[in-house]
Image (tube, rainbow, N blue to C red):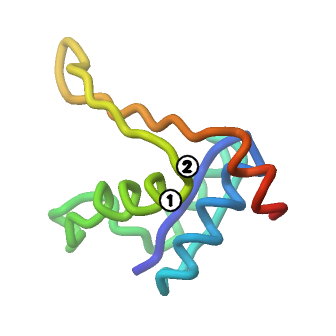
Amino acid sequence: MKILVVDDEELLVKAIKFNLEHEGYDVDVCYDGETAVSLARGGGYNLTRAAGGSGLGLSIVHDAVRALGGTITVEENHPRGTRFIVALPREKYEETKL
């Protein structure tokens, strides 16, 4: 499975990439939205279940967040959808020295 990790915090991206690769995933990274959109359009990522996605995205995120000592909270996102908030402790990143 090919995964794209996007965030402007380089240390966060490296930590997530490290953990996902450790679990056997193929991981691409970028640090801005424009690059992410470009990669997502041509990178072969399964963006929807209709495209054959396995539905494992949240499970993968949950495992990575737990491994980093973080939390995930869920909120309603009006007018539609759901918002997942990932919080990771900065100290954990500094300890990993990625």
Instruction: Name the residue rendered at 57%, 70% in the picture.
Output: 19
The residue where tag 1 is placed is 40
Say whether marks 1 and 2 touch (CB < 8 Å): yes
The image quadrant where one finds the N terminus is bottom left
Q: Residues within 10 Å of mark 1 (few under 14, many from 20)?
A: some
In which quarter of the view is residue 49 placed? Answer: bottom left
Instruction: Name the residue rendered at 32%, 60% in the picture.
Output: 57
Residue type at numbered disc 1: Ala
The image quadrant where one finds the C terminus is bottom right
Residue type at numbered disc 2: Val
Per the model, the C-alpha gap separating discs 1 and 2 is 5 Å
Check the image and report above or below for 13 versus 23. above
Check the image and report above or below for 72 versus 77. below
In which quarter of the view is residue 78 placed? Answer: top left
Q: Is residue 21 left or right of residue 72?
A: right
Secondary structure of the residue carrying tag 1 is helix
Q: Is residue 82 left or right of residue 13?
A: left
Which label number is shown at residue 37? 2
Secondary structure of the residue carrying tag 2 is helix
The residue positioned farthest toward the top in the image shown: 79
Q: Is residue 10 left or right of residue 73?
A: right
